[in-house]
Amino acid sequence: MKKIIVLLPLLFISFLPPLAVAAQKKLKVEKPDLEQIRRATLDPASKFYYPKLQKMYEVNDTVMTPEQYRYYYFGSMYQEDYNPYRKSDYTDRTDSLLNLNYAARQRRDSTMEADKAKKLGAFELKRRYENARTRNMREQREIVKIAEMALADNPFDLQSMYMLSRLLKDMGKDMLSRIWDYRLENLLGAIISSGTGKDQENAFFVISPDHEYFLLEVLGYDVDDYEYREPGYDYLKVSPSDSSRATRSRLPEGFFFDVRPLIQQYNIKYPENSAESTATGDEIILEN
């Protein structure tokens, strides 16, 4: 199994745990019936027919139920263009721009503190602040544009989705931010509802290996190591992101992800790469 490492910028992580808590309340935790999901999402007469779900998702509303999100998320594996290892060309650009934007905001705030110390007049202080804010907004609009392109290319790019929701909130576009938050919450809910991850029998299911790392960041863990275990499980060893948690309770040493369906669908769609996809120890390392 390929190992995909996505290094999330640290400024994201403090916002993530509340999303996971909310998502976990929506669905009963149980192993997904993937055969039922496959049949339903490919059946034009089904209420879970994939094009119907996709149209609902793209309406930009919060009308989809957690169950519909579950079918939408796992049903994507049975669509013609599914590739669990594909990564959008826009993602690295978005990450880089976001880090620059974060640094610019820090410079703006520190500059304003320095200007206040100079005891400039109120008019001059306001003029300087508005100039800095305008530059910052231009940068944010460009990042939003690229994040939207990344999500148009890959609707399940959870990292870009989270990034977009935070930026829109910072820009005062609360309604759009809430829509993206709702999408992210329910996609994470689909993953969290698939198991507990504490052993192979109760492993989580994901449609993309990079979702493993994103989910564990959401749950408040750093990934320390990776193992592929036959007949088709990723095991990620973890430690709590907040070291003080380790002294308060007994925490799991790692989490299991059942990647057999993912590998099976990849091999069906890309038979020329099937030997590579099932080889253990292979790694694809994606760094921001």
Image (tube, helix red, strand yellow):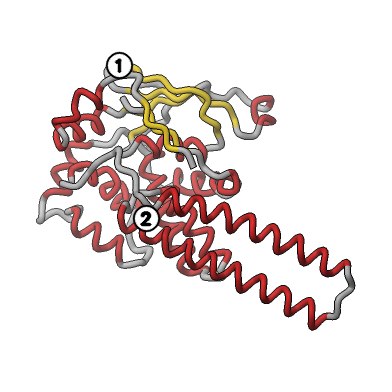
Tell me what residue is drawn at x 14 percent, y 30 percent. Answer: 272
Q: How many marks?
A: 2
- Residue at image x 51%, y 42%? 8
| Residue pointed to by mark 2 | 150
Report the amino acid beneath label 2.
Ala
In this view, 142 is above or below 29: below
Q: Please name the amino acid that badge 1 sits on.
A: Glu
Tell which circle, 1 or 2, labels the residue nearer the N-terminal end. Answer: 2
Q: Nearer the viewer, residue 18 or 167?
A: 167
To which quarter of the image does residue 59 belong?
bottom left
- Residue 202 position within the rendered picture, expressed as x and y whole percent measured from the top left: 36, 26
| The label number, if any, that marks residue 265 in the structure image | none
* In the image, farthest residue toward the bottom: 123
Q: Where does residue 142 sit, x and y in percent of width and height?
A: 47, 65
Task: Name the residue rendered at 11%, 50% in the picture.
Answer: 43
- Mark 1, residue position: 230
SS for dot 2: helix
Q: Position of residue 111 (x, y in %)?
A: 76, 64
- Element type where label 1 sits in the image: loop
Q: Position of residue 207 (x, y in %)?
A: 30, 39
Tag 1: Cα neighbours inside 10 Å, few (<14), some, or many (≥20)?
few
Q: Quadrant of the N terminus?
A: top left
Which residue appears at 43% of the width and 63% of the height?
Answer: 179
Please tell me whether mark 1 or mark 2 is closer to you in this view. Answer: 2
Q: What is the C-alpha distance between the residues marked 1 and 2? A: 33 Å
